[in-house]
Each structure stands twice: as C-alpha cells, then as structure tokens.
Amino acid sequence: MVFVVAIIVGIALGGWGLFSLAAGAVLFRSTLVRGKDAFLEKALGKTEGANAMAAHTRDPVVMNPIQAAKERWRAGPVSARQSARIRSFDGLTLAGEYWPTVTGGAESAAPSPAVVIVHGKDDTGAGMAYLAEGYHSRGFDCLLIDARAHGESAGSVCTMGVREAEDLSNWVDWLVDVQGKRHVFVHGVSMGAATAIIFAGRRCGLRPEVAGIISDSSYARYDEAFARLLFLAVRNRFVSWSITLGASVASRLLGGVSFGSMNPVCSVGRVSVPMLLFHGQADVLVTVRMVRDLFAEAARVARAQGRPVPEIVVVPEAPHIGPFFYAPELYWNKIETFCSEGASASVAQPFVPSGV
C-alpha cells in the first residue's frame, strides 16, 4: 500500500514539475526572448496582475512627457549626436547615441562629466530622452544605450540586468578610453536601474572614473517580482512560485542565466560608490518594499565598512518609473547635489552642475 501511494505521489509530483517547467518555459520565451508575443500580458488578462504591469503605461503624467521627449529626440538635429557601436563580451554589436555638450571642435576648459542612461525592459535609449534633456542642459555629456535584445542592439535574450551589466561596463570603458571622460555617472530606470546596481556591485570592482549610481524604480529580486505578478493572477502562492521556478530553470537552460542571478539586492552591498535610490510610493509593479530592501542591505554594509550610506527618495503617489514626473524639481535637486558630491569624491576635479 505504501509503495502504491509513493508511486502515485511521485507521478503527481513529476507531473506538476513538468507542468511548472512547461508553463515557465512559455512565460520565459514570452517575457525575455526578443520578438515573441507578450503571452504573460495576455495570460493575465484583466486580472490585478495585468493592472500592475500596465498601471504606469496608462498614466498620462508619466507617458505624455516620455512620448513628447522621444519625439523631440527623433526630430532633433542628428549632427549634434554621434552614433556609437561597441562589441559585447559575447560578440554582440551594441548600439547607442552619444550627445556631447561641446560640438564643432570647440575645446572646453575642463572635461565635462558624462552620464550613461540605461532604459527599462521593452524600451530603447530614445525612451530616456526626457532624462538626457535635463542632464545635457546641466552640462553633462549623455550616452543613451540600447540594451541587448532591444532597439538597434543585437541579441535575442534579455537577462534583466545580468549580462546587461557586463555590457554597461564596456560602455563605461568606451566613455573613458575613447571619449576621455573623467567623471562618469550611471542613471538607470527599472531594469536599467537593476543593471546599474549589478554593474556597480561586480566583484571585479569599478573604474575610478565611475562617480555614482542613480537608480529609479529598481526591483530587489526579479524572481520575487515575477512570482508576485503571477500570484495576482492565480491567487495561489504555490502555483505562482512553481511556475516562477520553471521559468527560472528555462531561463538558465535557454538563456544561460537563472532568475536567482537577476537580484540586485545580492550586489548592492558591494557597491563602493555613492548611490541615489528613487522609487514611487504608489508603484504596484515593483513595490516600494523592494527599494527599502535595497537600501537596508546597502546601508548595513556601508555602516559596517565606514562608507557613506546611500540616499533613498520615495515620491508619494508616483507609480513605477514615476518619481521624475511626479516631483521633477525634487528629482533634479537631488541629482544636482548628488553629482556635485560624487564628482568631488572622485579622482578628477569637482564638477558643479550648472542648473537650468
């Protein structure tokens, strides 16, 4: 009898495991493989999970300025910007646009600082034009990049910040070695923010020219965020985490990176440069608890090592990627102070943003 029960339980567990892996593989291909249908959004239908995924994209306070800036970027004088191309560590051609503050061969008295602006999932560098406009007016050279498997960059699989962090390192090398930049900041939004944190927390360390990291709406743990969206649809934690595990296994087998590697909270304690963390209190896609987890881990390690504690700025009523749009004056004031202090602590001479 016990033997029969064991067989039945084994078959049930095996069947559930196969279901979890199959469902997870479908969701992995839908969400992280370039050119596939957005099956996850369709599967969530009109559930609370779907509302969480799309809340910020339905907010005119967020989307109207993004679209307007993107149109200005595309219609603006191309001569003022330079097309940039580099090779990734695994041989992909990566694309970006470089917008220097000085054009026409003029020489400035001191090298201007630079900022790499890193977009979120399913966006492109052009979608970050709203930030580039503000930085450029404050005297920064701006590098807007297309992440692998996005825009004009090659690649078929998105790894939610893991391989993108290696690509970001190559872009920083390009700014320093080719453009001669001596102060480089990195500003990431959503997946781009996670990319920036993972990049800055790599065990190999950072170049001394990297002066600071600005994170807007980063998740702390991608697997947790993924499982939460599924839970909002199925309302069963066992099912949601089983499928998430299946998707993670599929990601490891098909893309080379598991969901467990896509967790910036595991890297944030190793970030040795100043950090500024923005998040929206009303973010239902990546809840505000995640930025508090990032801050708590970074602050714990910083205090233990005698380093400055990162600054966290939570904007009331702001949704995912919304802090800039709901509190633009506060946003830029924080960035100007942060960059001034970061430049002062770096290897080059201090730079003070000019303001607008």
Image (cartoon, helix red, strand yellow):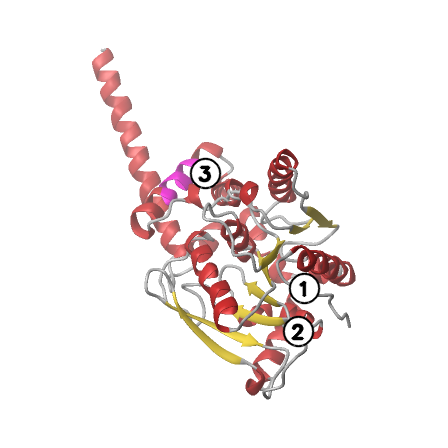
Q: Write down the residue under mark 1.
A: 349
Pick whichever of labels 3 and 2 is earlier in the sequence: 2
Label 2 element class: loop
**Residue at point 50% right, 40% down?**
266
Pick whichever of labels 1 and 3 is earlier in the sequence: 3
Mark 1 vs mark 3, foreground winner is: 1
Q: Which mark is residue 110?
A: 2
Give above or below for 35 relative to 9. below
Give above or below for 8 relative to 51. above
Alpha carbon of mark 1 to alpha carbon of mark 2: how far? 9 Å
Closer to us: 170 or 240:
170
Q: Position of residue 199 (x, y in %)?
A: 50, 53
Mark 2: which amino acid? Ala
CB-based contact (under 8 Å), mark 1 and mark 2: yes
Q: Position of residue 157 (x, y in %)?
A: 37, 58
Query: Residue 10: which quarter of the image?
Result: top left
Mark 3: which amino acid? Ser
* Stretch of the chain drawn in magenta: 240-248
Label 3 element class: helix
Classify 10 Å Cα crowding around label 2: few (below 14), some (14-19), many (20 and above): few
Q: Is residue 177 visible?
A: yes
Classify 10 Å Cα crowding around label 3: few (below 14), some (14-19), many (20 and above): many
Quadrant of the image containing the C terminus:
bottom right
**Residue at point 54% right, 71% down?**
180
Query: Residue 135: which quarter of the image?
Result: bottom right
Q: Write down the residue under mark 3.
A: 240
Alpha carbon of mark 1 to alpha carbon of mark 3: how far? 51 Å
